Image: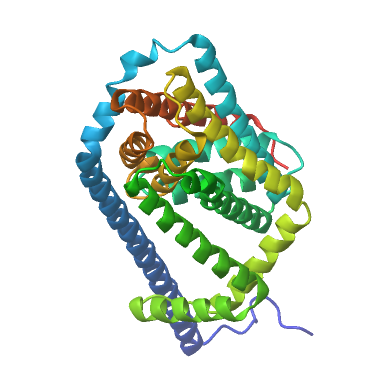
């Protein structure tokens, strides 16, 4: 017969002590893991705070240095009321068309089934990029999160946004080539000519580098190994970065696949994005009866777009105003009209797009996931 409840053997004292010790050891190990994870999270938070503080200091110093240019441009707001309402409406339509091209390009690259998540995330990310220090990366991160929350696969979003960004930047770097006839015909200031030659040289180098990376894996693998080695040496306390060269080539292949299947509409959208934006600046100058040769305006426009990529101030604020005003003056526009044209253009291309970020956030919250 099996032993009754009263006859069941009792655990020995030594077994109970051993089990208690094991439980305490497991608890101590769990507490140690929790403390290590909390310390790592705290370290990441401290690092993020330091980086944010550095960006804020750099932005404050930069804005202080370019404040006179910004104030001069903003001081031209009274003159904008003298512009014909018809031209202001044309500028608004042109900027809306530029935004639509950006949405079109991103939808092609991301393969989004609907327009709404793309529009909502682009408006929100674009607005954040224009107000946050180092805003380009922050805007892209916000757009990524919104698209993933809307149900788009993360890898698809990352590769699509990367492809769209690279194609958009490649087009603006290529635009100075279209102004070559204006350079060859003469009538251009020496300083502007020097800036153009530098821009063309940079474009040629970037084009050759990009074509080489497309044709061969060796440059990307070399870059990946170099960056990985330097990063691991600088951050010895962090987990080592691994397989960066392979990831770079994989991303390159994914970008080519993403854009390659619909390269014609993608290229048309990227060209339209900048063509409509440039037309907005031309409309501002035409409204003031101050339009020089379009080729010269194109050079000024390209310089302004490159200055907008300076990450020190949000959206290139100050740098774009100073650079565009100066290059328009070099192109032959009177200083007062250059200031007014710059303010009118930036009004539609920068300031009026800030509140659209709230529209994007509202659209993103209202859109169903999946």
| Residue 269 in the figure: left or right of residue 72 | right
Residue appearing at x 38%, y 62% in the figure: 41
Residue 43, picture quadrant: bottom left
Q: Nearer the viewer, residue 364 or 292?
A: 292
75 and 124: which one is in front? 75
Q: In the image, 215: left or right of 326? A: right
Q: Residue 26's x, y, as percent?
A: 46, 77
The color scheme shown is rainbow
What percent of the width, then of the height, locates residue 234? 34, 77
Rendered residue at 38%/73% (across/down): 32
Q: Quadrant of the C terminus?
A: top right
Pick the residue in front: 366 or 290: 290
Q: Is residue 145 left or right of residue 238?
A: right
Is 320 left, or right, of 355 in this rendering?
Answer: left
Q: Residue at x 49, y 43 (%)?
A: 182
Q: Nearer the viewer, residue 77 or 16?
A: 77
Q: Quarter-wise, where is residue 119 in the image?
A: top right
Q: Residue 322: image x %, image y %?
A: 30, 38
Above or below residue 81? Residue 201 is below
Q: Is residue 62 visible?
A: yes
Q: Is residue 281 above or below residue 146?
A: above
Where does the image place residue 253, in percent across and percent down from the top left? 69, 68
> Tag count in the figure?
0
Whether residue 121 is visible:
no
Give the position of the N terminus as an image quadrant.
Answer: bottom right
């Amino acid at each position: 017969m099996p032993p009754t409840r009263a006859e069941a053997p009792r655990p020995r004292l030594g077994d109970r002590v051993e089990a208690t010790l094991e439980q305490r050891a497991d608890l101590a190990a769990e507490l140690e893991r929790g403390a290590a994870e909390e310390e790592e999270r705290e370290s990441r938070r401290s690092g993020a705070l330091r980086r944010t503080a550095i960006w804020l200091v750099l932005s404050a110093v930069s804005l202080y240095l370019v404040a006179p240019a910004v104030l001069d441009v903003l001081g031209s707001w009274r003159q904008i009321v003298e512009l014909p309402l018809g031209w202001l409406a044309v500028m608004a339509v042109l900027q809306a068309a530029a935004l639509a091209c950006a949405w079109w390009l991103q939808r092609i690259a991301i393969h989004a089934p609907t327009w709404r998540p793309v529009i909502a995330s682009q408006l929100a990310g674009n607005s954040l990029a224009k107000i946050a220090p180092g805003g380009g990366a922050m805007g892209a991160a916000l757009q990524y999160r919104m698209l993933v929350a809307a149900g788009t696969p993360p890898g698809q979003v990352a590769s699509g946004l990367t492809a769209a960004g690279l194609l958009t930047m490649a087009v603006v770097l290529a635009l100075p080539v279209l102004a070559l006839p204006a350079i060859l015909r003469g009538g251009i200031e020496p300083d502007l000519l020097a800036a153009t030659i530098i821009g063309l040289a940079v474009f040629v180098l970037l084009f050759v580098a990009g074509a080489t990376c497309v044709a061969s894996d060796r440059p990307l693998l070399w870059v990946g190994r170099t960056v990985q080695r330097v990063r691991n040496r600088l951050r010895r306390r962090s987990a080592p970065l691994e397989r960066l060269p392979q990831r770079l080539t994989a991303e390159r292949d994914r970008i080519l696949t993403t854009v390659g299947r619909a390269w014609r509409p993608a290229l048309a959208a990227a060209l339209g994005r900048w063509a409509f934006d440039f037309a907005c600046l031309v409309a501002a100058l035409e409204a003031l009866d101050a339009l020089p040769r379009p080729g010269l305006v194109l050079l000024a426009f390209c310089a302004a777009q490159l200055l907008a990529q300076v990450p020190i101030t949000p959206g290139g604020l100050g740098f774009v105003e100073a650079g565009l005003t100066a290059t328009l003056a070099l192109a032959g526009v009177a200083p007062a009209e250059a200031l007014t044209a710059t303010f009118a253009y930036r009004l539609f291309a920068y300031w009026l797009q800030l509140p659209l970020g709230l529209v994007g956030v509202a659209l993103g919250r209202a859109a169903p996931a999946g």
